[in-house]
Amino acid sequence: MSLSKTPQTQHVLTVDAEDWPALMCSYLGHAMPASAQFPETLRRVMDLFDAHDAKATFFVVGTHAKDWPEVVREIVDRGHELASHGWAHRKTDRLSPETFREDVRRSVGTLEDLTGVKVRGYRTPFFSLLPDHPWALEAQIEAGLEYDSSIATLLWQRAGTPISDQPFLFELAGGASIAELPIPACKWGPLTVRLIGGRCMRVLPRSVAAGHVRRCEEADLVGMMYLHSYEVPGLRLARHVPRGLGRKGAMLRASALPFEVGLGRMHRATADLLSAFRWAPACEVITRLREQGRLATVRWPDPSASQEPR
Ligand SMILES: [Zn+2]
């Protein structure tokens, strides 16, 4: 890749830290701790980031943090930002406002107790914060969080509520506000692709994600990379489904196959982006934008009615 780093532009580097086999088993009613793959893959991701002098935000599942506290402390010790990815990785619409509030409180409290570091950000599993969930942001504000990163702009567009793919300040009906760091869509020919990360980076040509970040740089906008901890080392997920689950185990192994498509390309694709652009944790980018007066205010429940940055 021929791009050289542009010193003044920082893009956001994020990792959803989760153990795919443990989560899938829990959805089938077989609760089990996160496997040893969880800390191992996280360390390999951090090694890659170290090689490129890049710091990131790690959104960690609360139950996994409880299972593997050492690697959670290591995330902080190695200079990265620790943030919450919910307690048990449940979609927002599977939780009531009350249980969501408890999810935020429990997951954030666990991370803070383990590390002694204040947690500032939250990302809902599956980017499942949609226009009918203002209470999810209220719960985060009540918990003292400073930003949310749960909105996939393409999902909001499909829900009939187009929204900016640049960081902004979400103002709720009561006047409280929280910064939002949305997950942008990017263009691939005539198509709009959901994310710079995940399936997009595994399956599409590496130039798609790089082209998106380059266009952000040209327009002085912020790009975002979104990774899963198990993707970057190319973990063969089906091999890590526990034995003895019978038909459910066979179902899990089959359901792993779509997630494995292109996994072998992720390490190289991630390394390319890390070497071509400058990356920073979410909290750092939001603080910089806030200081520069570049966070536009967007009012809920009419997110299309935005104001000029203040
Ligand atoms: Zn997740």
Image (cartoon, rainbow, N blue to C red):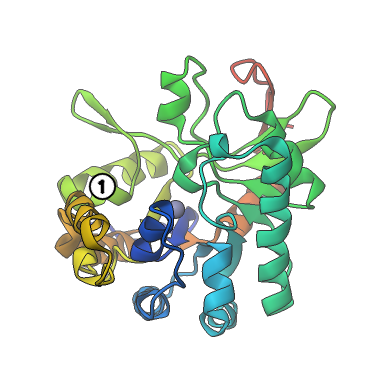
Q: Is residue 267 above or below residue 254?
A: below
On the rendered structure, is 106 left or right of 154?
Answer: right
Q: Position of residue 127 (x, y in %)?
A: 48, 41
Which residue is painted at 19% across and 47% down in the image? 207
Q: Position of residue 154 (x, y in %)?
A: 40, 28
Q: Position of residue 202 (x, y in %)?
A: 21, 52
Name the residue carrying label 1.
199
Q: Is residue 250 above or below residue 165?
A: below
Secondary structure, mark 1, is helix
Q: Is residue 222 visible?
A: yes
Where, quadrant-wise, is the C terminus in this rendering?
Answer: top right
Q: Is residue 116 above or below residue 130?
A: below
Which residue is painted at 24% across and 69% down in the image? 235
Which quadrant of the structure image shows residue 37?
bottom left
Depth check, front residue: 154 or 214: 154
On the rendered structure, is 139 left or right of 159?
Answer: right
Residue type for callout 1: Arg
Q: Position of residue 214 (x, y in %)?
A: 33, 45
On the rendered structure, is 28 left or right of 250?
Answer: right
What is the count of numbered marks?
1
